Image (cartoon, rainbow, N blue to C red):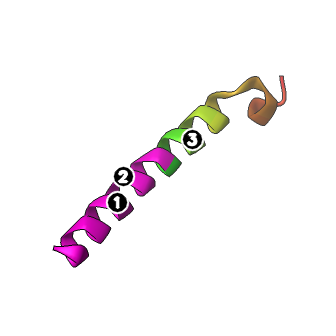
Amino acid sequence: AALSELSQVDQIAAKAINAKVLCYRASPYYNGN
């Protein structure tokens, strides 16, 4: 159970990080405008 929960947390964290990266890339600061 512990391993399964850890895996789920890792997946959620990865999705959150990916979302932050996408938002950061889409920001005008990243584009330099």
Q: Residue furthest front?
A: 2
* Residue depicted at x 31% and y 69%: 6
* Residue depicted at x 19% and y 70%: 4
Q: Magenta region's main secondary structure?
A: helix
* Residue type marked 2: Ile
Which mark is on residue 9?
1
Expressed as whole percent of the image width and height from the top left, the position of residue 17 reads: 52, 50
Disc 1 to disc 2: CB gap under 8 Å: yes
Quarter of the image containing the C terminus? top right
SS class, disc 1: helix
Residue 28 or residue 19, whichever sits in front: 19
Quarter of the image containing the N terminus? bottom left
SS class, disc 3: helix
Whether residue 24 sits left or right of residue 10 in the image: it is: right
* Residue type marked 1: Val
Mark 3 vs 1, N-terminal side: 1
Mark 2 vs 3, N-terminal side: 2
Q: Residues within 10 Å of mark 2 (few under 14, many from 20)?
A: few
Residue 13 higher or lower than 3, as above or below? above
* Residue depicted at x 34% and y 60%: 9
Residue 7 higher or lower than 3, as above or below? above
Q: According to the image, label 3 marks what residue?
A: 20
Residue 29 or residue 14, whichever sits in front: 14
Image: magenta residue range: 1-16
Q: According to the image, label 2 marks what residue?
A: 12
Q: Residues within 10 Å of mark 1 (few under 14, many from 20)?
A: few
* Residue depicted at x 40% and y 48%: 15
